Amino acid sequence: MRRFTGFEHGMGIGGWLTNYKRFNVLPQNRRLMLTIGDMEHFASYITEEDVAYIAKLGMDHIRLGFDQIVVEEVPGVYREEIFKHIDNFIAWCNKYGLNVVLNLHKAVGNYCDIQEEVELLDDEGLQERFIALWLAFENRYAQDNSIAFELLNEVRDVDPVKWNQLAQKTINAIRQQNPDRKLIIGSTCWNSVQTLDKLQIFEDANVIYTFHMYEPFEFTHQRGVLQADTLFYNRKMPYPCDIERYRDFRRTLFGANDAYSGLAQMDSAFIRQFLKPAADWIKAHPDKILWCGEFGTIRHADIRWRENWMQDVIAFLKEQEIPYCVWNYLSTPNDGNRFSLVDDDNRQILSEKMARIIRGEKI
């Protein structure tokens, strides 16, 4: 498999230009509006010191999520103030030797955590806005081919053919301006590894493919307040653990035909079985790059359990030579799914063992 040089082990940043507040609690007519408080948050939440610290932790790249409504004031008009924040962020990354993935985390018509009235893949006007937004980024950063563009985070459970078609149109538009831009594209069902085989293989050497990893979900999102199942279940869960202790919950999620009924433990064997489609994909496409762009555990899970899970996931990724980016550096106070790996007050890594694990060191 080809190497994703300079993007081997990274850190995601959410909570700044995306996930700065949770839209599911807002009425429909306020979800896509920005406030004075939002703009103050964008101007102060991430600083050069944060980027320097991520570099000090040993990361080689940062995946920066942003929302379409944060950058786009109205269709075709973009906020210079926000672009200057991104300019500054890229300059900081350059200063500290970090590469950059710019990730459209939430597009109008494809919010991973709310259902919208009009879906991106069903509306030609929204698709034109989507492509125009990426062309605006290409125009601005045309002189820096080290920046990778991740076209869309966690495409919903939609027709994969429609997503493949929009991805191809976007690739074609960007290629008219820049044949060398690294473009990252994930599959449907929220970047599930289980739908990688539904993602088109593009005739383009600079396309990188991606997936996310949050299994077992009842562990990574335990007692999470934004998902009905984990909120209802409301139970602490260690890792590794005996599957049978949590069989009742898995049945509420998956029914009687639990795909992991043959396993006794939620452990490294569980991880390997769930991620087998990634290993199969690599064997089928040895000339392509596969990148795990997001994986992590909810903040309030015991740090020892988080370390155990992260170590097992990264061990699999390194075995398969899959580059990766952990989620997430920092969480806002109102984020219902706080996945931060640093303390949200002092912004220091939660444990030195975790720092070694995410760097990919052997423990």
Image (cartoon, rainbow, N blue to C red):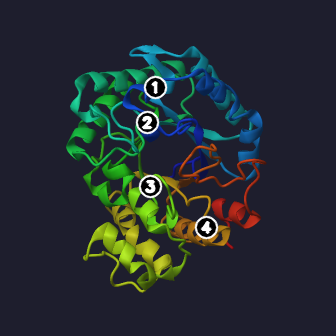
- Camera-nearest residue between 73 and 287: 73
Pinpoint residue 91: horizontal percent, then vertical percent: 69, 28
Instruction: Please report contact status of discs 1 and 2: CB closer than 8 Å, yes or no.
Output: yes
Label 4: how many Cα within 10 Å (few below 14, some 14–19, many 20+): many
**For mark 3, what is the residue?**
212
Whether residue 135 sits left or right of residue 10 in the image: it is left
**For mark 1, what is the residue?**
69
Label 2: how many Cα within 10 Å (few below 14, some 14–19, many 20+): many
- Camera-nearest residue between 182 and 216: 216
Q: Amino acid at mark 3?
A: His
Task: Identify the mark nearer the N-term, 4 or 2.
Answer: 2
Instruction: Please report contact status of discs 1 and 4: CB closer than 8 Å, yes or no.
Output: no
Examine the image and state in which quarter residue 296 appears: bottom right
Task: Identify the mark nearer the N-term, 3 or 2.
Answer: 2
Q: Is residue 174 above or below residue 341?
A: above
Task: Identify the mark nearer the N-term, 3 or 1.
Answer: 1
**For mark 2, what is the residue?**
106
Circle nearer the viewer, 3 or 2 = 2
Instruction: Please report contact status of discs 3 and 4: CB closer than 8 Å, yes or no.
Output: no
> Distance from label 1 to label 4 (Cα)?
33 Å
Label 1: how many Cα within 10 Å (few below 14, some 14–19, many 20+): many
Residue drawn at point x = 29 percent, y = 32 percent? 120
The N terminus appears in which quarter of the rendering?
A: bottom left
Which secondary structure, mark 3?
strand
> Distance from label 3 to label 4 (Cα)?
17 Å
Which secondary structure, mark 4?
helix
Task: Identify the mark nearer the N-term, 1 or 2.
Answer: 1
Label 3: how many Cα within 10 Å (few below 14, some 14–19, many 20+): many
